[in-house]
Amino acid sequence: MKKFIFVWFSLISALLAEIHVVTTYPYLAEIAKEVGGEGVRVKSLASPKFDPHFILPKPSLIPALRKADLLVINGAGLEIGWLPPLIKRANNPKIRPGGEGFVDASRVVDLLGKTHAVSRAYGDVHPEGNPHYALDPHNVLPIAALIERKLETIDPASKRRYRENFDRFSREWREFLKDFDAKMARCRGKKVVQYHELYNYLLHRYGMESTGTIEPLPGIAPSSKHTVELIGMMKKEGVDTILQDVYHESKTARFIASKTEAKVVVLPHDVGAVEGADTLRKFYETVAERLCR
């Protein structure tokens, strides 16, 4: 009986000692799991099947935020339309902006496309910069280092474990990047059209060119006039690849492809967005396999 009681109390103590990390998107959850390891429970709020700009702020997400020790967000305005009301209702001071447990991953990334011109005339622009930096795998390690530092701050007793986890992950990820960069080198010089400026960081990193978007402006549905102009440009420039995500309509991309003989390539924007991309490594491997084969 004494042994049973001891084991029971040990289990309860372990559960109580768990650090709860909540992330806004799945790719951040995968990074947090690598750094946190055992003793850190990680939950992602958003589904990778939907537009990351417009996640439904369901009340069922509030309990996770309420008990979170750490909240890791993508930042650069990507969550602005859905996260603030959830944070407010969770009433957890630790994870409010500026709180000890609030982590904005965009702060350690060199953002592309910063602008001071904010107007509906330009569509749904992000003045802080393009928020879709997750598509560049070289941004993973700075984010992992940021999460590791924050975990050490809120849980100093486990500092050594977090440091060891990060060091291991860092070594493994650098090896992964060598292989991934070699695969992506086959795509250098490729011209593409994308639906939304979702893949800019990937294209920039690996020397590809985005010649246009199916959206005439960010967040604005394609018009007939813009589509016709895009088809003409693609024929003139010899663009043979259209990058399609999983959450925008695909009818327009297929129509353009039929008029230009271009290939529509469906790429994931996050871990779990397409079949077979259910881990951090498989996410990027899927991108390389589909785009650069």
Image (tube, grey):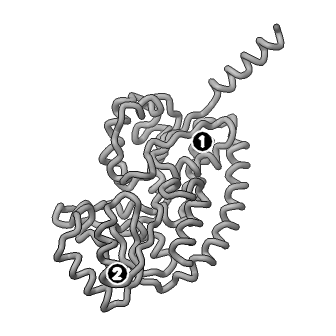
Q: Quadrant of residue 13?
A: top right
Q: Secondary structure beneath disc 2?
A: strand
Residue at image coords 57%, 81%: 185
Looking at the rendered structure, which numbered label has been put on residue 151?
A: 1
Question: Mark 2 to mark 1: distance in Å?
Answer: 41 Å
Seen in the picture, residue 166 relative to 175 is either above or below; the reply is above
Q: Amino acid at mark 1?
A: Leu
Chain-order first, disc 2 or disc 1: 1
Is the residue under label 1 in contact with that under label 2 (CB below 8 Å)?
A: no
Seen in the picture, residue 108 relative to 229 is either above or below; the reply is above
Q: Secondary structure beneath disc 1?
A: helix
Q: Position of residue 265 (x, y in %)?
A: 44, 72
Residue at image coords 57%, 58%: 276
**Residue 48 horizontal side relative to residue 278, left or right:** left
**Residue 131 horizontal side relative to residue 28, left or right:** left
Q: Position of residue 41 (x, y in %)?
A: 60, 36
Q: Position of residue 7 (x, y in %)?
A: 77, 18
